[in-house]
Image: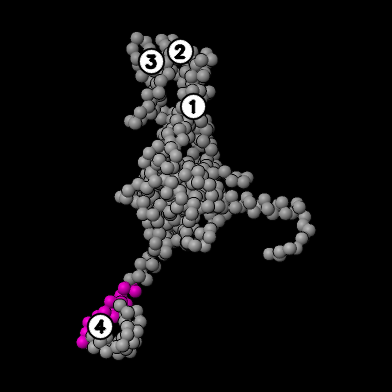
Amino acid sequence: MEVGLVKQIDIDEEMQQSYLDYAMSVIISRALPDARDGFKPVHRRILHAMNAMGLRPDSPHRKSARIVGEVLGKFHPHGDMAVYEAMARMAQPFSMRYPLVEGQGNFGSVDGDPPAAMRYTEARLTPIATEIMADLGKDTVAFVDNFDGSMREPTVLPAMAPNMLVNGATGIAVGMSTSIPPHNMGEVCNALIYMLENWSQLDDVSLKDLMNFIPGPDFPTGGIIVRKSDDVDPLASAYGSGRGKLTLQARVHIEDMGRGRSRIIVTELPYQVNKANLIERIADIARGGGLEGLADLRDESDRDGMRIVLELTKTGVPEKILAELHRRTPLQTTFSVIMLALVDGEPRMLSLKQALRVFLEHRLEVVKRRSEYDLARAKEREHILTGLRIALKNLDDVIQTIRTSRDPDQASQRLQHRLKLSATQAQA
């Protein structure tokens, strides 16, 4: 870098290059998940820091403020609230299909309530999070220096579980975004097993074959995916191209109240719908006269599950009111599927098959590196045991050599010379 020199540059070229540099930084370092483990850097660093702190499922919870401080000080020098919000989301069962953080305290609600301040809440890892980081210490993934070069951090996690597909991902980058729906763990694993069993004929594995195992997303808040009978299957389209739109509806049923009256019961909501805002929206429409036949609206949700009750008058027609609610409230929403993730450091649109394949290739590499690590440690152990066996066969000579040596270094050198031991064996 030239210091003290003023250079003339073209502002158009400089703006273009600076914007591209910024865009790629946002894409790679912030907004898009890695297709191998499904994490953005902030989530990966949070889990790595918690793992390093020993916050496993069988350990006591630790204050969230302590965890956030660890992440900020060692791996992620950004805003503390950004880190806390990312950690809190991983603890929310209505946001994550399989939470990775077990929270203790108020971590928010489906009504849109924010988590309590980090000084009040506590957290530790869930069992699935420990599986995602299993074998991290066996040279299974690459490590790089942290922001100040004082520590090392993983570029990707070993990810024994297919996190990107089972927990999904959302993110907005510069000029692109990602929106990957969550799926059922058992269904995804069955599809992965099928692909492994047909690894040599992978080109023959069709989308239809995979959808026999993964019929669709599995949202943490439930709900139903609907489509018109004359439409192209939106799921097949989304899984085949990596992009599509799904129509989600709340799960409802109708109960008979007697005397000619009935009520609509909502037990599951579309993904990412705020329950409190939904109820407020329904009440606003009813007050404006847009829901004829609605007599009462209550939220009876408790720790056992969700239950929104809409009591109707004798003249209220449940099907008609439901149709109006689907049209005017988030009781029916659209979920955009954009399966965009980083592959080899570049953003790539992935089909379902490609996403599964990237994960399997990553796992094959992890297992290979783990096996090489275990083999190297076993060979080192074998080498030491061979030396100990030689020493036991010549025990008197070894004792005499050690006693007559003036220091450990001389004893080691004499043992190496007399018994043909290596330095490692002599030291052991």
- Using the numbered discs, state the Cα–Cα distance from disc 2 to disc 4 in whole angstroms: 93 Å
| Residue at mark 4 | 391
- Using the numbered discs, state the Cα–Cα distance from disc 4 to disc 1 in whole angstroms: 77 Å
- If you read the primary sequence from the N terminus, does the residue marked by circle 2 or circle 3 appear first? 3
Tell me what residue is drawn at x 50 percent, y 46 percent: 80
Q: Nearer the viewer, residue 327 or 195?
A: 327
- If you read the primary sequence from the N terminus, does the residue marked by circle 3 or circle 1 appear first? 3
CB contact under 8 Å: marks 3 and 4? no
Tell me what residue is drawn at x 49 percent, y 23 percent: 280
Kind of residue indicated by mark 4 = Ala
| Residue at mark 3 | 262
- Using the numbered discs, state the Cα–Cα distance from disc 3 to disc 1 in whole angstroms: 24 Å
The mark lying in front, picked from 2 and 1, is 1
Tell me what residue is drawn at x 41 percent, y 10 percent: 314
Numbered badge on residue 293: 2
| Residue at mark 1 | 277
Residue 194 in the image: state x and y as whole percent: 39, 51
CB contact under 8 Å: marks 2 and 3? no
Kind of residue indicated by mark 2 = Gly
Question: Alpha-carbon neighbours of circle 1 within 10 Å: few (<14), some, or many (≥20)?
Answer: some
Query: What's drawn in magenta, residue-wise?
Result: 379-396
Q: Tally the numbered discs.
A: 4
- If you read the primary sequence from the N terminus, does the residue marked by circle 3 or circle 4 appear first? 3
Tell me what residue is drawn at x 37 percent, y 47 percent: 62
The structure's colour scheme is one colour
- If you read the primary sequence from the N terminus, does the residue marked by circle 2 or circle 1 appear first? 1
**Element class at badge 1:** helix
